[in-house]
Amino acid sequence: MRAGFLLALLISALAAVSTVAFAPVPAFKAPVASETALGVKITVQVGDGEPIESALRRFKREVNKSGHLMELRHRRYFENSQEKKKRKVKEGRMRKKFERMQRKRNANRT
């Protein structure tokens, strides 16, 4: 269910971004960022002869880094301020936990 929703959301985001984002950009012209109704500005410059799969992979990475999909997930249902604070504290705890685990892994490598 969730995977289908995320796939539909990603496809709609891809459709919202015009084909200009995937067009090769001439060297003399500045890249043009296309903007959707959500205010998402994501551009992917495709090199000559570059497969569309790698450009799509880079686009997905940029979408994930921008955090807009997470924001959409949180706005799917109404969340009052107390619930938002609880979620932020929980996310902070998880982030700290993963940072500790990463430091521990890096310390074990040396």
Image: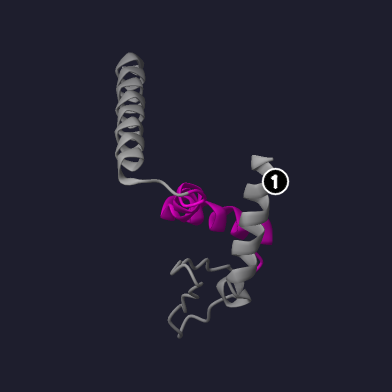
Q: Does 69 appear in magenta? A: yes
At x 36%, y 26%, the residue is: 98
Q: How many marks?
A: 1
Query: Residue 23: x, y in percent?
Result: 60, 75
At x 34%, y 42%, the residue is: 84
Whether residue 48 appears in this view of the structure is: no
Q: Quadrant of the N terminus?
A: top right
* Relative depth, front residue between 70 and 74: 74
Query: Residue 86: x, y in percent?
Result: 32, 34
Q: Report the residue that reaches farthest toward the top.
A: 108
Left or right: residue 87 versus residue 76 is left
Q: Main secondary structure of the magenta part?
A: helix
At x 48%, y 56%, the residue is: 62
From the image, tell me which residue sits under label 1: 4
Left or right: residue 4 versus residue 110 is right
- Tag 1: amino acid: Gly
Query: Label 1's element?
Result: helix
* Relative depth, front residue between 101 and 2: 2
* Relative depth, front residue between 51 and 75: 75
Whether residue 15 appears in this view of the structure is: yes
Crowding near the residue tagged with mark 1, few <14, some 14–19, many ≥20 C-alpha atoms within 10 Å: few
Query: Residue 37: x, y in percent?
Result: 50, 72
Can you say whether 104 is above or below 27 in the image? above
Query: Residue 40: x, y in percent?
Result: 45, 66
Can you say whether 1 is above or below 14 in the image? above
Q: Report the residue that reaches farthest toward the bottom.
A: 28
Q: Quadrant of the C terminus?
A: top left
Q: Write down the region rendered in magenta.
A: 49-77
Q: Does 54 appear in magenta? A: yes
Left or right: residue 43 versus residue 107 is right
